[in-house]
Image: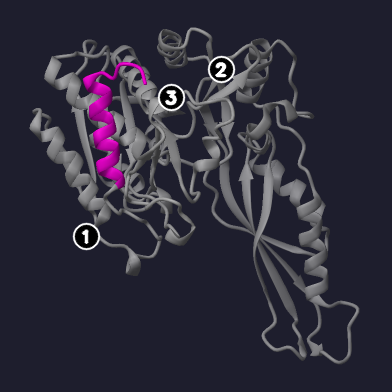
Amino acid sequence: MSHVSPLEEEALEHIRALIRIDSVNTGDARTIGDGETRAALYVQQRLDEVGYDTTLVEPVPGRASVIARLAGQDPDAGALVAHAHLDVVPVDAENWTHPPFGAEIHDGILYGRGAVDMKDFAGMLLAIARAFRREGVVPRRDLIFAFFADEEAGGVWGARWIVQNRPELFAGATEALSEVGGFSLPLPGDRRAYLVATAEKGVTAATLTARGHAAHGSRPTADNAVVRLARAVAAVGAHRFPVVRTATLERFFELYGRASGEPLDGDDLSRLGFAASLIDAGARNTASPTVLAAGGKINVIPAAASATLDVRVAPGQADAVRTQLAAVVGDDIEITWARDIPAIEAPADGRLVGVLQEAVSAEDPDGTVVPYLLPASTDNKHLSRLGIRGYGFVPLRVPADFDVYGQFHAADERVPVEALFFGTRVTARILRDA
């Protein structure tokens, strides 16, 4: 292991301490304890120690977030929100090789729930915030350090609540930096691409309903609602929506193709290896059947059957996806839509992306920052309601065969310690110069 700086040591200390705080968010208020508040208090106390004026926001008991601001050199430059969430998804400890809240290190690998999602970035931000304050570092622009509750259940008591009820905490902010991106992917010649999420797909739900005539199960009918629904669900499962050439996707094809030395398009992403499914999901609208409901008694053919789909929508596709899905399921299936969470898209060639590249290059001269479209959602969607443009970039240089994306919500969630040190160095450069 290379020489470890005090900043890197402190970041690792905070990451491990946060992992050891069980802040599981089940999404059910009856089964959520006070872990998020305990994690927020840990952060607040350590920010207070170095002189920050912190704000603890706790809309309901146990669901706390903490926010602090560091003044920059240019009062006219929009503030940058650097944020991480303190909650984690549930664990099934039986499937773990090492204790999920033990933060144990084995063979240079840190294990624990939150190791990549996303107590790693929370610990980095905390260490950097403290170091900047102790050392009198004045960044180019104001930095707003935010540590949110409840991201894993939609930010209801975290970022969403604060945006709606305490927007003044983000006064003057124009951009935000958080998950999901920054992890290295292999390029030819022992080089690496570091993906930055400059866009996120929108989210909605579609419910398919088939109707027929109720009848006795002993007398099959030609309009059995369950059968018709099953056909529609199978059609959705087999359908592949067309590639949507968003500005972000075009930029990805351009930069990744140039860096790899071979043109890339949406029809064949196989050479991206384990990242292919991620990029493909961001390149098109998707619909995943997730909930089925039909009947209640084995000898009764029900009059109706329904299926709910998780629909992820590329930027600018809110109307098109509805037309496309209707064509897939056919005229005899009713479709009802839930409220949309719109897609977000920040400039893929903005100044901040250039700062990310410079910071990566300082630590990995052969590293190339490449924008991509995240098929999921982060707290950046909530901040976007205040006009804040969100980017996902938690820089981790990992071995070519290490799938960081595969660690999210997985058993034995883990990350190389050296990657955390790399991320701390790069993030410190970004926050100083952004």
Looking at the rendered structure, the kind of residue marked 3 is Pro
Vertical side of 279 occupied by 191: above or below: above
Front in this rendered view, residue 348 or 187: 187
Disc 3 to disc 2: CB gap under 8 Å? no
Q: Which residues are magenta?
A: 1-19
Would residue 190 be counted in the magenta stretch? no
In which quadrant will I find the C terminus? top left
Mark carried by residue 395: 3
Q: Secondary structure at mark 2?
A: strand
Q: What residue did someone put label 2 on?
A: 192
Q: Amino acid at mark 1?
A: Pro
Q: How many marks?
A: 3
How far is the residue under mark 3 from the one under mark 2? 12 Å
Mark 3 touching mark 1, by CB under 8 A?
no
The crowding category of the residue bearing disc 2, from other C-alpha atoms within 10 Å (few below 14, some 14 to 19, many at least 20), is: many
Q: Which residue is mark 1?
A: 61
The earlier-in-sequence mark between 3 and 1 is: 1
Q: Quadrant of residue 209?
A: bottom right
User: Would residue 269 be visible to someone looking at this image?
Assistant: no
Q: How far, Cα to Cα, is label 1 from label 2? A: 44 Å
Q: Which of the labelled discs sits on residue 376, or is there none?
A: none
Relative image position of residue 92 (x, y in whole percent): 45, 60
Secondary structure type for disc 1: loop
| Residue 303 percent location from the top left of the image | 75, 81
Mark 3 or mark 2: whose residue is earlier in sequence: 2
Disc 2 marks which amino acid? Arg
Which image quarter: residue 283? top right
Residue 281, horizontal then vertical, whole percent: 66, 39
Q: Earlier in the sequence, mark 1 or mark 2?
A: 1
